[in-house]
Amino acid sequence: MSDGHGSSPETPPPGWSPEQPPPYGAPQASPWTAPGSGQQQLPYGQPYGTQPPQQPYGAQQQQQYQQQPPPPPGYGNMPPHPHMALRPGIIPLRPLGLGDILDGTIKFIRSNPKAVLGLSALAAGIAAVPAAVGQALATKSMGSLMESSTTGNLTDMYSGLIASYSATGISLIISFIVTTVLTGMLTRILGRSVFGGKITPGEAWHLVKGRVPALFGVVALTGLIMLAPMVPIVAILVAMAFGGAEAMPVIGVGLLLMLAYVVYVLFFNTRFAFASVAAVLEGLGPIEAMKRSWRLVTGDFWRVLGILLLTGLMAAIFSYIISIPFGIVAAAMGLAGSTTAGAAVSGVAVALGSTIAAMITYPFQAGVAGLLYADRRMRSEAFDLVLQTAALEQQRQGWVHSSADDLWHPSNSARS
């Protein structure tokens, strides 16, 4: 009998088999439940109460991960992707940006503070002692001048000023010596820090002492080149002054010559910026190190100049900020009078200010120069490939051997 839809309930439609659940095939319990009964409504065709439990999400992910094919042979020894470069030490082993250089310099100081800051403080303290004595003598002399202007006091004042300037000159000479040696030691520490290794102050001195003559040679030759134009500049200005020229032309020519001299200094200072680093890390002589620096800067002069100017300005500002409170104390002692205690406090304040400022600025500038040198080698000589290969081998061994210092030799460049 028809139900009004054109088929009998006992006759299944085409495509249905006897095994299908109701209404066709063997009768089964209805999967449908009354609303609110709390029982789950299963999909049609699945027996009630036989739904398998769902696996936790983490187990599913772990099973999918285990089913992935293994990596190809030798995958662990493949060179790193440029955007995921190895970083065993203070910098990623790839060409560096300004942020990498500044970050690496800070990490250089923090990675070995006992050696870096300790050596810098020692060098700055040694150089500050004569300056402190000169400041104390100048403070006492100025105090005597403020108290009285008699002939005897004027003589004492002039004697004190002469002694002060003499002490300042001695301080500059000592600072030149200790800064040169310190630069070499910090450069050697930096070279090992790139690979994640550390050097004690004693080991740094042992590695650098043979390079001290080359360092002084580089500094002396660079200084002579920087000062050479001053002789003709002074001669021109003196000739104009005694030749009857008016004051304004002399001043104008002097300003133009000084401007040209500033350009001259910036040019050669940039060209020889890596000479000290090359003398230490590559074991070159003074002239060879200066030639090496000239070649490394070629092709990227303006970038090197910009980074050196920026970081030099940062170091100068930081040094000035640190020295302000100590300078205020020294000036206050000078205005207070000519007592020995006041002069001593003034000298100590100047020494502390210069020592603390130099303790940070010395390694900062050495770190920037060293990392900029490494960046130029990576860009011009593909030196990052050499560093990456060495870093992988050191990671395999589990430690940084002292032979890592030899990797900086120019013969190890990928394009040498």
Image: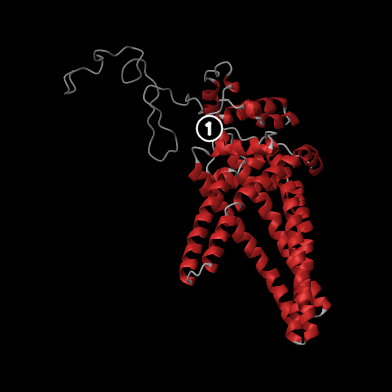
Q: Residue 231's x, y, as percent?
A: 59, 56
> Disc 1 residue type?
Ser
Left or right, residue 37 beside residue 233: left
Q: Quadrant of the N terminus?
A: top left
Residue positioned 72% across, 58% down in the render: 172
Front residue of this view, candidates 402 and 69: 402
Q: Secondary structure at mark 1?
A: helix
Q: Height in image: 211 above or below 259?
A: above
Q: Residue 294's x, y, as percent?
A: 57, 39
Q: Quadrant of the C terminus?
A: top right
Quadrant in which residue 184 is drawn: top right
Left or right, residue 75 beside residue 12: right
Can residue 106 be seen at all in this image of the molecule? no
Front residue of this view, candidates 373 and 19: 373
Residue under label 1, please give it. Answer: 380
Q: Residue 414's x, y, as percent?
A: 58, 25
Q: Height in image: 67 above or below 61?
A: above
Residue positioned 83% across, 76% down in the render: 341
